[in-house]
Image (cartoon, grey):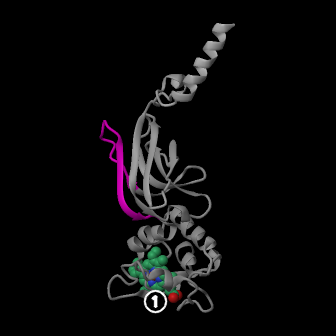
Amino acid sequence: MKKQYITGLLFLGMAGVSCDDGRLYEDQIAIPEAGRVAKLTGQLTGVGNWAEGYDVVVAGFAENNDFAIITKDVQVSADGQVSTILSGIPDEVTEVEFCVTNRLRKRILTFRQADLNTTDTIRLEVGTMDVGMYATIQEQLFNTTCVSCHGASTFAGGGLYLTSGKSYDALMGKPSQLVEGMLLVNPGKAASSLLYQTIDTDISTTWRQDHSNMVMSPTLKGVVRDWINEEKER
Ligand code: HEC
């Protein structure tokens, strides 16, 4: 009886003081997962402003497959700092990316690809970036495909500026010069927005510049559509 009592006291004592010596928790210490580890660091804005169904992630893909095998949501602290670790990356992963995926974990677009030629932690150091939905449309659509004729030189087709810093105000709720009664972006309504019709239909075949086949990627068109549909007039 006496012995049991003493053991009980001893146990209570240990439980009280030994939280950080580790011994009591030996069973619970996580064994490091197998597989490689990737680490994303940077100063990001816009991570949370994507429309429903899109996720900004670090993801691993197998060759020639747009569906991620493994993903980790990017979390941003209050000051915009990001440090996200994707661990347990299996051998069949041949590409690790900082990207946007949809509900099915399908790759929508890529911000950065990691260099996998390392035996150490795979590093994605992206610096300061705006990865918001509109900033991404600006970067991956307007800047690459449109600004050459819409404001980057002395020429702005149809008087429309799609350059960074100007495009949003030029589009949002503004009337079209070419199609009477139509808005370039009708917030909440992609189908009746000329911007979306220009990239998704053949409405421009009668214009001085046919735009019908300028944007081939269905996922990029989808991002524009979903952005307009989520957008409210400000
Ligand atoms: C090769 C030059 C060129 C490129 C590239 C180009 N555009 Fe245009 N765009 C024009 C011209 C020229 C007009 C005016 C056509 C006219 O006056 O008949 C125009 C007109 C438009 C209009 C109609 C503006 C209005 O007020 O009605 C929209 C919308 C538009 N472009 C969007 C785009 C988008 C989005 C892209 C990129 C995907 C793009 N354009 C790429 C030359 C171009």
Mark 1 Cβ and ligand 1 under 8 Å apart: yes
What residue is shown with label 1? 158
Q: Is residue 77 visible?
A: yes
Q: Residues within 10 Å of mark 1 (few under 14, many from 20)?
A: some
Region of the chain picked out in magenta, as a range: 112-131
Identified by mark 1, the residue type is: Gly
x, y percentage for residue 34?
Answer: 45, 30
In which quadrant of the rendered image does the C terminus lie?
Answer: bottom right
| Closer to us: 37 or 7 | 7
Residue 122: give x, y in percent of width and height.
Answer: 35, 43
* Residue that protrudes farthest toward the right in the picture: 1
Q: Position of residue 191 (x, y in %)?
A: 64, 75
Can you name the residue that lies furthest to the front here?
2
Residue 228 falls in image quadrant: bottom right
Q: Is residue 197 above or below residue 39?
A: below
Q: How many marks?
A: 1
Residue drawn at 46 percent across, 89 percent down: 158
Q: Residue at x 49, y 85 (%)?
A: 170
Q: Is residue 100 magenta?
A: no
| Mark 1, secondary structure of its residue | helix
Residue 142 lies, in percent from the top left, at: 43, 74
- Residue at 40 percent across and 87 percent down: it is 156
Write the residue at 61% across / 87% down: 182
133 up-or-down from 124: above or below: below
Quadrant (top left/top right/bottom left/bottom right) for the N terminus: top right
In this orientation, which residue lies closer to the viewer: 34 or 187?
34
Q: Is residue 210 visible?
A: no
Residue toward you, 229 or 47: 47
Instruction: Check residue 124 for magenta coloring.
Output: yes
